[in-house]
Image (cartoon, rainbow, N blue to C red):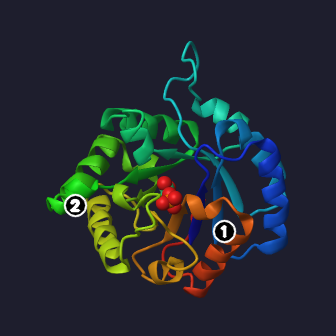
């Protein structure tokens, strides 16, 4: 089970340290449950330091650029992310795609750079409301997955995790039903198998996960974890999401590296 907190553009270094202190009072490590925090880049080092005593916690960046170094104002390379303490990166979050115009070619280059540089990629895919209503969900997630992973050796993707995040569910309070999410997860699992990706690669669900729906979603064996925005910003609420995930029984793939 992987429970990942996407803090988006919230939480400076001081807030990160305060969060980590309270979090450690509220949540004990548990075997087979990995917690990942994606703070903003400026707080990655603070998070890595504050959670250093927690073997169950990984720190990630929300985005990464594929060039190793140079004149790329505003960008973070894989090596810089790792130097700050990150071991994971989100790739292709819907806000990167829809707010910042990130293309599927960009996601491909980022996946390759992350894998080659030793950052575990969490590749995000998901359809918009218009695409869902037009019956295009499977085609959209398939195209996103294939474009990001095409031509990448399966052996380089051993650490890949995928997050299914329907765009219409992100930050809206309207989560996918467990049945709908499980269906798309099965589709993704089939597509990943076709690409030779190990069966233990986790597939997370994201989009308005909260303490009220986490248990139902995570009880589904197709759903190996959650990627959570709003409900991960307050340690008390985040601890409740984790408790609900624990109560769901920890079904699903192992959390991996
Ligand atoms: P949300 O965000 O939980 O606030 O819907 C999820 C995400 O964007 O990863």
**SS assignment at label 2:** helix
Quick check: 112 left or right of 147?
right
Residue 92 in sight in this render: no
SS at badge 1? helix
Q: Which image quadrant is residue 211 in?
A: bottom right
Can you identify the residue that label 2 sits on?
132
Q: Position of residue 49 (x, y in %)?
A: 82, 47
Q: Is residue 256 left or right of residue 134?
A: right
Residue in the image at 44% along x and 47% along y: 93
Going from the N terminus, do you reach mark 1 or mark 2 first? 2
Residue 210 can be seen, yes or no: yes
Asked if residue 220 is positioned above or below residue 161 in the image, the reply reads below
Asked which quadrant contains residue 92, the reply is top left
Quadrant of the image for the C terminus? bottom right
Q: What is the x, y in percent for residue 202?
A: 47, 65
The answer to whether residue 9 is left or right of residue 25 is: left
- Indicate the position of residue 226 as horizontal and vertical percent values: 51, 67
Q: Is residue 70 above or below residue 63?
A: above
Q: Residue 76 appears at what percent x and percent y?
A: 59, 29
Looking at the image, how many numbered discs can be counted on the residues? Answer: 2
Q: Write the residue at 37% across / 44% down.
A: 153
Using the image, determine if residue 255 lies above or below residue 245.
above
Q: Which residue is mark 1?
A: 238
Disc 2 packing (10 Å; few <14; some 14–19; many ≥20): some
Q: Say whether marks 1 and 2 touch (CB < 8 Å).
A: no
Q: Nearer the viewer, residue 214 or 34?
A: 214
Quadrant placement of the N terminus: bottom right
């Amino acid at each position: 089970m992987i429970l990942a907190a996407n803090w988006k553009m919230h939480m400076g270094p001081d807030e990160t340290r305060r969060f980590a202190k309270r979090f450690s009072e509220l949540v004990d490590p548990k075997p087979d449950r990995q917690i990942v925090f994606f703070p903003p880049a400026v707080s990655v080092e603070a998070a890595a330091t504050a959670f250093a005593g927690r073997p169950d916690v990984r720190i990630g960046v929300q985005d990464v650029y594929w060039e190793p170094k140079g004149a790329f104002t505003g960008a973070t390379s894989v090596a810089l992310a790792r130097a700050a303490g990150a071991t994971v990166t989100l790739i292709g979050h819907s806000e990167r795609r829809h707010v910042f115009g990130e293309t599927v070619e960009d996601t491909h280059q980022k996946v390759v750079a992350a894998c080659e540089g030793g950052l575990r990629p969490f590749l995000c895919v998901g359809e918009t409301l218009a695409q869902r209503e037009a019956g295009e969900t499977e085609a959209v997630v398939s195209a996103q997955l294939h474009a990001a992973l095409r031509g990448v050796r399966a052996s380089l993707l051993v650490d890949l995790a995928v997050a299914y995040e329907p765009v219409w569910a992100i930050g809206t309070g309207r989560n996918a039903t467990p049945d709908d999410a499980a269906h798309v997860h099965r589709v993704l699992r089939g597509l990943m198998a076709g690409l030779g990706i190990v069966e233990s690669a986790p597939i997370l669900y994201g989009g308005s996960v909260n303490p009220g729906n986490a248990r139902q979603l995570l009880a589904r064996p197709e759903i190996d974890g959650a990627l959570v925005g709003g409900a991960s910003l307050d340690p008390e609420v985040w601890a409740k999401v984790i408790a609900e995930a624990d109560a769901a029984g920890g079904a699903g793939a192992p959390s991996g590296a």
